[in-house]
Amino acid sequence: MFRKGPGMEVVVINLPRNEHLHSMEIEFPEGSRVCEAPEYRFSKPVIFYGSSITEGGCASRVGNAYTSLVCRWLDADYRNFGFSGSAKGETVFAEYIAAQEDMGAFVYDYDHNAPTPEHLEATHEPFFRIIRKAHPALPVLMMSRPNTDDDPADALVRREIIRRTYERAVNEGDRRVWFLDGHSLFGAEGRAECTVDRVHPNALGFMRMAQRVYPVLREMLLA
């Protein structure tokens, strides 16, 4: 239950991330008025594809996932295709995303779920090419994973694979691609305090991720 002022305001209800929602009831005091919410500033949805981090795993509450934070700050609609352990750059899912209409931007960072760097290299650029062929002008952000501290060598190899996809696109004249080094997402200080298990971000980790992703995604949407 919460209290609000006498004027009209937008109320956002974040639905459960993993739990199945069978029913929901919302009670209003007598005399209340409910209206349709105004349009988002960016009505074309941002599409996210990635790991359990993208999904929002271990967020202290659903609205604290970096995807939720960023899109709330942007006032943008979004769709979250984050899959715990299951997003591995499958061609069929790239085709599914490519079939989406009127996307505002696309963000993908599934290197955590790629079983090996070789798998990531074999799938990362082809995944992008499928999206790009269907949407030549779509802004695309390629990110690498944020928790690089346990195995820096492996994280570096994966980051460079992602960077190569980005650089090849730029060298071919693509000006609608962005790259974000995942190592920068947690910042330089207090990195160990950003996760619950040295992998999944907690509220601090997601906030730091959102603070880094927000200006990039805003630039993409306004470009």
Image (spheres, rainbow, N blue to C red):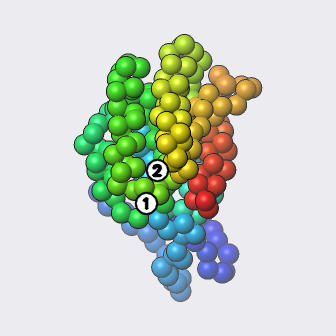
Front in this rendered view, residue 78 or 130:
130
Residue at the extreme bottom of the image, as rendered: 31
The residues tagged by marks 2 and 1 sit, at their Cα atoms, a distance apart of 7 Å
Residue at the extreme left of the image, as rendered: 92
- Residue 103, which numbered label? 1
Q: Does residue 42 appear to the left or right of 93 in the view shown?
A: right
Question: What x and y, as percent, mark residue 23?
Answer: 32, 61
Name the residue located 28 percent from the left edge and 48 percent from the top edge.
Answer: 95
- Residue 106, which numbered label? 2
Q: Does residue 104 appear to the left or right of 215 in the view shown?
A: left
Label 2 neighbour load within 10 Å: few <14, some 14-19, many 20+: many
At label 2, the amino acid type is: Phe
At label 1, the amino acid type is: Met
Say how many tags the image has: 2
| Residue 169 seen in this snapshot | yes
Q: Secondary structure at mark 1?
A: loop
Question: What x and y, as percent, mark residue 185?
Answer: 63, 34
Mark 2 touching mark 1, by CB under 8 A?
Answer: yes
The image shows residue 113, relative to residue 27, as above or below, that is above
Q: Does residue 147 appear to the left or right of 100 in the view shown?
A: right
Name the residue located 62 percent from the left edge and 28 percent from the top edge.
Answer: 183
Front in this rendered view, residue 64 or 7:
64
Residue at the extreme right of the image, as rendered: 189
